[in-house]
Amino acid sequence: MHLEAGAADQSFREEVRDFLNEHLSPELRQAGQRTMGICSPHAASQAWQKILYAKGWAAPSWPKEHGGTGWTPMQRHIFATECYLADAPMLAPMGLEMVAPAIMGHGSEAQKAYYLPRVLSAEDSWCQGYSEPGSGSDLASLQCRADRDGDDYIINGSKIWTTDAHYATRIFCLVRTSSEGKPQAGIFFILIDMDSPGIKVEPIITMAGNHEVNQVFFDDVRVPQENRVGAENEGWTVAKYLLEFERGGRAWGARLQGAMAHLRHLAEARDMVNGTFAQRLAGLAAAVQAVEYTEQRVIAEMSQTGRIGPASSMLKTCAGTLVQEIREVAVEVIGNYAAPYQPAAREWGSNIEPIGSPDELTVVAHYLDFRARSIAGGSNEVQRNIMAKLVLGM
Ligand SMILES: Cc1cc2nc3c(=O)[nH]c(=O)nc-3n(C[C@H](O)[C@H](O)[C@H](O)COP(=O)(O)OP(=O)(O)OC[C@H]3O[C@@H](n4cnc5c(N)ncnc54)[C@H](O)[C@@H]3O)c2cc1C
């Protein structure tokens, strides 16, 4: 594994920078800056994915046969970092980085042929239906029912915290056919059209003031059996496989670099980069580098095994905690300018004059939003349990 970029990587970096300079309009960059949750404003994210798709760069982590770039791990890291530093909109991960690997790993040939191109081109957008009002960490206790009826299943129940369900055209769900035996045994993984009759989406507004998550209700929703991925009792295997990609495959190092660059910019604007504060920044920068190295190691292992494995839990916990710390320091840096509450001004495309500089507008929302990352994608406590068992063998 080589962690230093060589001459070829430097020229690749230049190529990426040129592409970003040419294709990232000020509006798209603003959408990147105003990303308050997991994804950038939906329309911007879709528009940017289409531009990347036209270039063949929409899915760097996919195998080439399905439309991936064939880049080395270092090239992928460079691309992700440059995108963050240039404020490119963040692409929604639920399609490209979650359901797509699950379909590649466990789907039928017909499912691969139908769904993967639509994920890649942004024709479909996806949401994830795992959590339920009574089942999060203990996901195997989920109750959403699927009953056979001819060639279909009839789905009844509810999913919660469903990111982007209000935009998604499809949802991948874990549902239960049987309550007999081990709780994991009666579960399967299914792909559902969001415009199916009987689906209702209700918004949940986060403490950052954003509409990102939802509750989704299924009332006698009819879904063809051919939409099931894997066998009826295989849902737990597919679900765990997908979670590795959700937790590990998120270009954490690049995201941290982006957050650090923003923090440094805020501090420099106030002439604060000196004395003990400079030491604090240096400490954060060293921690960012440690996460980047860990990520590179995980990616290098993955290119050999094809799986991210339980190290994804380590990456998610360390990186998520570090982003929270960086966002918290940013709030300290802007001081009194953390006080104004202007949710309408920080909407993408808003022309409301911000109180303070536009760079400060999103600082508190970023901080509040990132509190949720200790829970989203599986709580830190649960990740530590996974690390203890599967990484440390305790
Ligand atoms: C912003 C956001 C977006 C999300 N998006 C989605 C989505 O798109 N799709 C989806 O399906 N889900 C989504 N989730 C749900 C997320 O996966 C769950 O919230 C998470 O798994 C925790 O489940 P819970 O909320 O039921 O909390 P609980 O499981 O009730 O946990 C409550 C607390 O108990 C602790 N705890 C629970 N069990 C243990 C244990 N065994 N050992 C130690 N501590 C434990 C937890 O760490 C936590 O602190 C999202 C959540 C958030 C916050």
Image (spheres, helix red, strand yellow):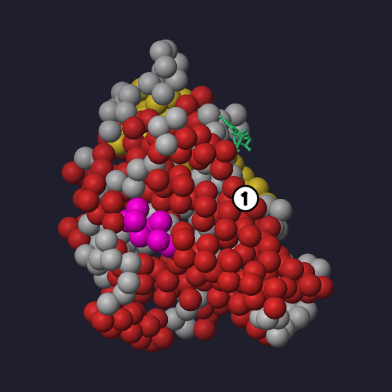
**Which residue in the structure is indicated by mark 1?**
372
Q: Residue at x 42, y 36 (%)?
A: 392
Secondary structure predominantly adopted by residues drawn in magenta: helix
Find the magenta span and give its range.
292-299
Q: Indicate the position of residue 90 as horizontal and vertical percent values.
A: 47, 66
Task: Report if residue 294 lies within the magenta region.
Answer: yes
Q: Position of residue 125 (x, y in %)?
A: 42, 55
**Residue 104 is covered by the magenta coloring:** no
Which residue is drawn at the image coordinates 21% and 40% (left, top)?
Answer: 108
* Quadrant in which the N terminus appears: bottom left
Query: Residue 187 or 80: which is nearer the viewer?
Result: 80
Q: Let me know if residue 125 appears in the view.
A: no
Q: Is residue 181 left or right of residue 26?
A: left
Residue 296 in picture, x, y percent from top left: 35, 60
Amino acid on which the number 1 mark rests in the picture: Ala
Q: Is residue 36 above or below residue 316?
A: below
Q: Quadrant of residue 135?
A: top right
Residue 276 x/y as whole percent = 70, 73
Q: Nearer the viewer, residue 72 or 284?
A: 284
Residue nearest the viewer, comparing 221 with 231: 231
Q: Identify the residue at image location x=40%, y=32%.
A: 393
At a point 34% along the width and 32% down the height, the residue shown is: 237
Whereabouts is ligand 1, in terms of quadrant? Answer: top right
Q: Respond yes or no on whether mark 1 lies under 8 Å from ligand 1.
A: yes
